[in-house]
């Protein structure tokens, strides 16, 4: 009898966990905290600071969503995931957002039942070599030993690049970034390859970053962005428009410093009024957000440019140039749909 | 009612009833597990399918015993991985057996220093986790050996560096068939000679140096054929070109580290098994053998070890299985075995975690069962001969 009850309870639990819950937003509000899945540690994107608080580009996006939905950027629980476990964790409901430099691909979007809501960082796979090697181009890597961090699209890009250029190589696949770094430093490999952002992050953690360089060739498209589960369009819209609000903030010159004063007055540019809640923004109530959602995001976290410069920009050890990651008007790839 | 009671009271029938009940419970639990997985997969919008095995894998593998390139299927990538698992298990088992038997015998030596060294070897090695052994050996190899440009050269034909050990490769040309033929003739001669020598010894007691005669025959005959047919073998000598050595054959640092680690770790267990096996042979056997004037080495190889084998083989089998299964830790240092290919990169590229894991588990199961079957066959043979 006892076992029967236990089994019934277990079955019910499994069924309950398997079913899609009514509204992700209601869940987050009821809990009072947002659950966010981030990287186990990648300088600039998600890494603990000296006080043990998570900081970084991906972390700031979690904070922005918390500011939009809960009005408080600090109300986030962080869960870490490796390249292998991230989708499983998202599917299992361990977080509402996967904000972990994840490449948007067809199969991941369609086959794995999850929704990519936009691109927050345009990346591409690159190669890092010691300067002493004297290599200036990835085309000169014929015969090299290449350390790869597995569990990503990296292996396929690498194989295609070397095959397309009729070059041979010796792959050394390694499970985590830190182990791959050790092999690279010990000279087991001539080259280390992963997304260029990851290479800069890795290089910034070396004793002598200036002894190494990232080769100019970028061999793949890696549009990175936040991911949510399939099936809750309201939540996907909230997360997507939070990202766009940060970019619109940069476009409209709204910064964390001036957002409060801009929100308090009637601006000539009516798009600023609509974004900051001065003028009505049709449909906002359907998202279930308060009128000052964008003010909360920009005042507590900052606009896209501020977040980028704070975590990845020239003033940080990573020294990543904006490149493709700037507004269309500045020569980048971000073209934001109008806020109207 | 009383009839039912009598069935329950009967010890034999009660046992059967309980067993049937337990079997039903297990069966019900398993079917519940499977249907649960199935239901959850459906809820996630996933299906169970093995079609991914036949699409191109798209990734490269750094060591392949059969032809492979990144346009081959996931299935072939898995087979390449399986062969790599088999290769490292094979080398590991040879090293572990050789080392284990030697250490086991030394451990019983009357020489205080030798037996203490063997004792500390066993105690140190088997009490450190195998993963640390693997990482340690890999670390030693890649950190202490020089870069290819400063490689240690052996007569300019073999090179040792942190990219591996490169040796010349034999390339065969026309006329090689004669050499192969003489190798076969040499082996047949050796077998016949071995039988003849044994018969002769049984009849007259006269002994021939069988090992040395056979060895020279097996080497000399093909060598004569080699010169007769105009030296149909050429060597491809590895040479430094660009970043690395090209040509020749090589053993990667990963394969070497894994072989050392698995061999040395498992040897500690085998040493203890060998020691136990030798101690299990009655002391009188040794004394009797010594009393008829056999040399200590002959006492060991002719009297003690053949009898100890009966005790040694069954636990030795499980050590061989352990070694093979432990080789799946290869992924830690980037050796591309079955777990790293089919159970690693293929899993990630296709998202078929359930299917790949089931296949990998079934393969390990069948490999283990095959090794068991082989060792059981050998065990039965030894048992019959020994008694």
Image (tube, coloured by chain):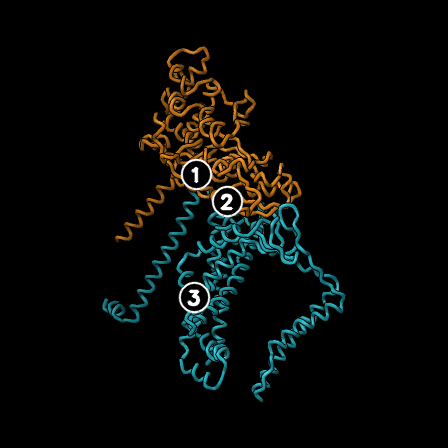
Can residue B330 be seen? yes
In this rendering, is residue B182 above or below A326? below
The orange chain is: A
Cα gap from disc 3 to disc 1, whole angstroms: 44 Å
Q: Say which chain tag 3 marks.
A: B
Q: At which x and y percent is residue A144? A: 61, 45
Marked residue nearer the N-terminal end (1 or 2) = 1
Count residues near mark 2 (Cα–Cα under 10 Å), then give few for <14, some for 14-19, many for 20+. Answer: many
The cyan chain is: B
Count residues near mark 3 (Cα–Cα under 10 Å), then give few for <14, some for 14-19, many for 20+. Answer: some
Can residue B273 be seen? no
Tag 3, which secondary structure?
helix
Observer-side mark, 3 or 1, equals 3
Residue at point 49% right, 32% down? A318
Residue that mark 1 sits on = A41
Locate residue A267: give its quadrant.
Answer: top left
In this rendering, is residue A49 above or below A247? below
Residue that mark 3 sits on = B117
Left or right of B382, for residue A134: right
Q: Say which chain tag 1 marks.
A: A
Do marks 3 and 1 share a chain?
Answer: no
Residue that mark 2 sits on = A180
């Amino acid at each position: 009898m006892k076992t029967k009850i236990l089994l019934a309870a277990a079955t019910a639990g499994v069924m309950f966990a398997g079913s899609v819950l009514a509204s992700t937003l209601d869940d987050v509000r009821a809990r009072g905290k947002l659950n966010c899945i981030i990287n186990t540690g990648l300088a600039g994107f998600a890494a603990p600071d000296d006080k043990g608080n998570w900081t970084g580009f991906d972390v700031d996006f979690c904070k922005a969503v918390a500011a939009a939905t809960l009005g408080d950027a600090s109300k986030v629980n962080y869960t870490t995931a490796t390249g292998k476990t991230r989708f499983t964790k998202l599917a299992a409901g361990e977080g509402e957002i996967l904000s972990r430099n994840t490449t948007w691909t067809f199969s991941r979007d369609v086959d794995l039942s999850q929704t990519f809501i936009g691109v927050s960082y345009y990346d591409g796979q690159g190669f890092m070599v010691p300067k002493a090697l004297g290599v200036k181009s990835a085309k000169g890597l014929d015969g090299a030993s290449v350390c790869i961090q597995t569990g990503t699209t990296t292996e396929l890009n690498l194989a295609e690049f070397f095959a397309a250029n009729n070059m041979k190589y010796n792959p050394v696949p390694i499970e985590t970034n830190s182990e791959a770094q050790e092999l690279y430093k010990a000279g087991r490999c001539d080259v280390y390859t992963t997304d260029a952002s990851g290479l800069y992050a890795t290089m910034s953690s070396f004793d002598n970053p200036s002894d190494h360089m990232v080769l100019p060739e970028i061999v793949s498209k890696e549009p990175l962005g936040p991911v949510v589960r399939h099936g809750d369009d309201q939540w996907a819209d909230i997360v997507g428009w939070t990202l766009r609000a940060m970019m619109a903030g940069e476009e409209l010159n709204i910064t964390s410093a001036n957002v409060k004063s801009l929100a308090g007055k009637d601006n000539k540019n009516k798009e600023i009024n609509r974004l900051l809640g001065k003028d009505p923004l049709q449909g906002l109530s359907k998202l279930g957000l308060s009128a000052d959602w964008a003010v909360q995001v920009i005042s507590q976290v900052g606009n896209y440019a501020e977040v980028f410069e704070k975590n990845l920009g020239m003033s940080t050890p990573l020294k990543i140039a904006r490149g493709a990651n700037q507004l269309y008007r500045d020569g980048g790839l971000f073209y934001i749909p109008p806020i109207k | 009612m009383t009839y039912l009671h009598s069935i329950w009271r009967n010890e034999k029938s009660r046992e059967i009833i309980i067993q049937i009940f337990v079997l039903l419970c297990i069966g019900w639990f398993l079917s519940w597990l499977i249907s649960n997985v199935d239901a959850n997969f459906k809820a996630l919008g996933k299906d169970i399918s093995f079609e991914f095995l036949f699409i191109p894998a798209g990734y490269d593998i750094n060591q392949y015993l059969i032809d492979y390139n990144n346009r081959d299927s996931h299935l072939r990538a898995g087979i390449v991985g399986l062969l790599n698992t088999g290769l490292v298990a094979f080398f590991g088992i040879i090293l572990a057996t050789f080392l284990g038997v030697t250490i086991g015998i030394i451990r019983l030596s009357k020489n205080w220093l030798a037996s203490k060294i063997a004792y500390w070897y066993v105690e140190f090695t088997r009490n450190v986790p195998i993963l640390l052994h693997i990482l340690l050996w890999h670390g030693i190899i890649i950190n202490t050996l020089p870069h290819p440009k400063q490689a240690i050269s052996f007569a300019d034909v073999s090179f040792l560096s942190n990219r591996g050990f490169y040796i010349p490769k034999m390339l065969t040309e026309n006329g090689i068939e004669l050499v192969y033929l003489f190798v076969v003739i040499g082996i047949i001669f050796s077998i016949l000679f071995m039988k003849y020598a044994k018969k002769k010894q049984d009849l007259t007691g006269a002994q021939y140096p069988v090992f040395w005669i056979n060895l020279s025959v097996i080497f000399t005959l093909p060598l004569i054929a080699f010169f007769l047919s105009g030296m149909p073998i050429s060597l491809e000598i590895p040479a430094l070109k660009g970043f690395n050595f090209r040509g020749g054959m090589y053993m990667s640092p990963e394969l070497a580290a894994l072989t050392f680690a698995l061999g040395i770790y498992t040897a500690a267990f085998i040493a203890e098994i060998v020691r136990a096996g030798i101690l299990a042979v009655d002391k009188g056997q040794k004394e009797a053998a010594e009393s008829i004037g056999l040399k200590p080495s002959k006492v060991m190889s002719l009297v003690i070890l053949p009898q100890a084998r009966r005790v040694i083989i069954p636990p030795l089998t499980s050590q061989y299985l352990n070694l093979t299964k432990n080789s799946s830790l290869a992924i830690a240092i980037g050796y591309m075995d079955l777990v790293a290919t089919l159970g690693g990169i293929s899993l990630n590229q296709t998202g078929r975690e359930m299917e790949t894991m089931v296949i990998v588990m079934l393969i390990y199961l069948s490999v283990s069962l095959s090794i068991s079957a082989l060792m059981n066959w050998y065990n039965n043979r030894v048992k019959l001969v020994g008694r």
